[in-house]
């Protein structure tokens, strides 16, 4: 077997290759060693910059697959028929050559550029070259600069990989991912059959003190249904929002028949709409479609299709899902393998993104300098007007946030406000301590990664509050607060409520006595939104598992269970209390981001560091953006929580 390892600078290619050598009996070869040897023979220095220039010149002279040809030839002479792993592949023709030789390509990915830079700084060659972070960004730019198949382009070669490994966590996590991947490679390709599980991996899999016994609670069929649902919603959203239209055409679309442009199909409306399109019988599907009652203008517009239009769209969507069925199957298999890793990492108590770490560190945000032109255009559009720059760019993957490349302003706000700020407030007001039993069963946020799927237990609540402000006039949530209250009333009648549950019931009785109140409507919306978002979380990351006192996983978090609902009501009461200043802090966050992205500093690659403490101490007298824009952000405080443009 021949395995080729590809990936960007400091993504972990060498580590993966070394682990395959150490635990799976591979022999390792490297094209970089050939480059360095030829440089030394010519008496030239071996800095990274010189290696890149020399290697590019040799490829031009000898062909794009020169180094992999030489490396493979040398390896076969030295190692015979042994399994080989070859790293440092950068060109499309190198990948094509290796695949023609029967090779398998593994891409090692790490989107966290800050983490990759830190890895480089701890390596000998990193110290020798003394690169700054700006220099490192240039390295990344150079390794993706190739325009032909004979020139380096890491993004292109990674896209050709047979398998992909995300390497943004711990070495332990990477080892587990490698083992899971190796299990999927056909054994017939290996000269030396793999052991069932190397000793190091058996140790990771069976630790009793710090890791729970993992049971598989995510079925492949469930994940496939969720993936189909997501792809169907994408198809319908694309149809109804008419993304190919110009702004003028979209504004006038109500005058065109039968076009009715919808700004957005909400996840809650999708749960009522999709059953019509998933019904195979078109006549029954039409009956379901016509029975749906619209609550908002967008919902009404999505339900204006006549019988022929609906049946046509119904067939088109069915045909579309059949056409992309292989892609769906592949996506689900990838998710299924990743979820196994997530299950093992859920209770990792050495996470660098624990609450204690992130609330002091906050977020570091900067523009990806490849997108300077995009930001210049956005700044030009707003000038001194009311619409913020961050409203225009909120969905564009043009920034780095918290070390994550290809991020968005909307995600930065989610991380800052919904994860860091809200978890901090829950801690300060004793909510985390009150519900420590629940949190211990899914992963203590003081010790585990608050950005992972279990962190959404709180973050999805804060996100829902922001999204509620843009719900639309007349919106009716899928579930009402009275349905939650009924669960607690029934438990109270049977003496099965804990002291915390009884306290929750008191709160529910008080809130439900005023069904037209802001709190009642908001909590109903946020809970319905949480249930809808939960499906998307399950599709991408798997179910939130729960474990008992013996570290045994016993099932999944039940959003209708007393423990979670009590936590949910306490969290909602806190964020809706005026003294918590959620809306005030959110405005401060938006102002800070707007001030930064409307400035020259962002265009020059400078960074913005934001913590909850920074927001509290923000000097509002020093704000330079127009007051009309501040007023707009205040009136539309949930604008970064919605996909469509409010401008």
Image: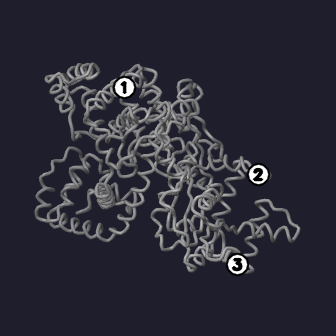
Disc on res. 77 = 3
Around disc 2, counting alpha carbons within 10 Å, would you say few (fewer than 14), some (14 to 19), or many (20 or more)? few
Around disc 3, counting alpha carbons within 10 Å, would you say few (fewer than 14), some (14 to 19), or many (20 or more)? few
Disc on res. 124 = 2
Residue 506 point in image, percent of width and height: 23, 19
**646 relative to 576, above or below:** below
> Could you give the CA–CA distance between mark 2 and mark 1, rounded to whole angstroms?
47 Å
Q: Could you tell me which secondary element the residue under label 1 belongs to?
A: loop
Lower sequence index among marks 3 and 2: 3
Q: Which numbered mark, 3 or 2, is in the foreground of this view?
A: 3
Residue that mark 1 sits on: 435
The quarter of the picture where residue 295 lies is top left
> Could you give the CA–CA distance between mark 3 and mark 2, rounded to whole angstroms?
30 Å
Q: Could you tell me which secondary element the residue under label 3 belongs to?
A: helix
* Residue furthest right as drawn: 43
Lower sequence index among marks 1 and 3: 3
Q: Could you tell me which secondary element the residue under label 2 belongs to?
A: helix
The quarter of the picture where residue 439 lies is top left
Name the residue located 47 percent from the left edge and 48 percent from the top edge.
205
Q: Is residue 51 left or right of residue 159?
A: right
């Amino acid at each position: 077997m021949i395995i080729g390892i590809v990936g960007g600078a400091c993504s972990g290619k060498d580590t993966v290759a070394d682990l395959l050598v150490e635990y799976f009996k591979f022999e390792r070869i490297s094209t970089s060693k050939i480059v360095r040897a030829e440089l030394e023979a010519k008496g030239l220095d071996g800095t990274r910059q010189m290696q890149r220039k020399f290697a590019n010149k040799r490829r031009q002279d000898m062909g794009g697959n020169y180094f992999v040809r030489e490396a493979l030839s040398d390896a076969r002479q030295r190692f015979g028929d042994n399994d080989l792993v070859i790293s440092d592949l950068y060109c499309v023709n190198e990948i094509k050559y290796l695949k023609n030789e029967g090779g398998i390509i593994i891409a090692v990915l790490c989107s966290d550029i800050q983490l990759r830079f830190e890895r480089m700084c701890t390596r000998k060659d990193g110290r020798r070259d003394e690169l700054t972070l700006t220099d490192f960004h240039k390295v990344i730019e150079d390794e993706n600069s190739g325009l032909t198949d004979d020139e380096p382009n890491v993004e292109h070669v990674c896209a050709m990989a047979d398998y992909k490994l995300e390497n943004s966590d711990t070495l332990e996590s990477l080892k587990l991912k490698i083992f899971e991947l190796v299990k999927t490679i056909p054994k017939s390709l290996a000269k030396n059959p793999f052991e069932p599980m190397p000793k190091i991996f058996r140790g990771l899999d069976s630790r009793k003190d710090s890791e729970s016994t993992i049971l598989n609670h995510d079925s492949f069929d469930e994940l496939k249904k969720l993936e189909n649902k997501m792809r169907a919603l994408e198809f319908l959203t694309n149809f109804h929002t008419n993304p190919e239209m110009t702004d003028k055409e979209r504004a006038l679309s109500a005058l065109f028949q039968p076009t009715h442009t919808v700004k957005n199909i909400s996840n809650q409306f999708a749960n009522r709409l999709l059953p019509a399109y998933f019904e195979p019988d078109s006549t029954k599907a039409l009956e379901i479609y016509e029975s749906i009652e619209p609550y908002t203008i967008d919902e009404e517009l999505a339900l204006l299709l006549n019988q022929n239009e609906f049946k046509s769209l119904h067939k088109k969507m069915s045909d579309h899902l059949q056409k992309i069925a292989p892609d769906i199957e592949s996506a689900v298999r990838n998710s299924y393998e990743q979820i196994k890793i997530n299950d093992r990492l859920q209770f990792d108590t050495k996470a660098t993104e624990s609450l204690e770490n992130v609330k002091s560190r906050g977020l570091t945000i900067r523009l990806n300098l490849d997108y300077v032109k995009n930001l210049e255009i956005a700044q030009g559009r707003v000038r001194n007007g009311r619409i913020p720059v961050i409203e225009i760019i909120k969905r564009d993957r043009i920034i780095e946030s918290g070390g994550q490349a290809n991020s968005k302003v909307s995600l930065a706000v989610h991380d800052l406000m919904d994860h860091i700020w809200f978890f901090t407030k829950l801690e300060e007001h004793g909510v985390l301590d009150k519900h420590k039993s629940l949190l211990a069963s899914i992963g203590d946020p003081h010790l585990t990664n608050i950005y992972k799927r279990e962190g959404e237990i709180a973050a999805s609540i804060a996100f829902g509050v922001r999204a509620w402000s843009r719900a639309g006039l007349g919106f009716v949530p899928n579930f009402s607060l009275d349905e939650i209250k009924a669960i607690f009333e029934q438990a109270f009648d049977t003496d099965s409520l804990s002291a915390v549950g009884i306290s929750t019931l008191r709160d529910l009785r008080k809130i439900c006595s005023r069904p037209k109140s802001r709190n009642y409507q908001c909590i109903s919306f946020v809970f319905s939104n949480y249930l809808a978002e939960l499906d998307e979380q399950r599709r991408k990351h798997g179910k939130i598992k729960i474990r008992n006192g013996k570290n045994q996983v016993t099932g999944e978090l039940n959003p209708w269970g007393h423990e979670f609902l009590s936590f949910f009501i306490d969290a909602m009461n806190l964020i809706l209390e005026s003294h918590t200043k959620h809306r005030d802090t959110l405005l401060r966050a938006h102002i800070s981001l707007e001030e930064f992205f409307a400035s020259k500093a962002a265009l020059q690659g400078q960074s913005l560091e934001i913590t909850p403490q920074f927001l509290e101490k923000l000097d509002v007298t020093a704000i330079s953006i127009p007051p009309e824009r501040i007023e707009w952000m205040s009136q539309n405080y949930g604008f970064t929580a919605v996909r469509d443009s409010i401008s």
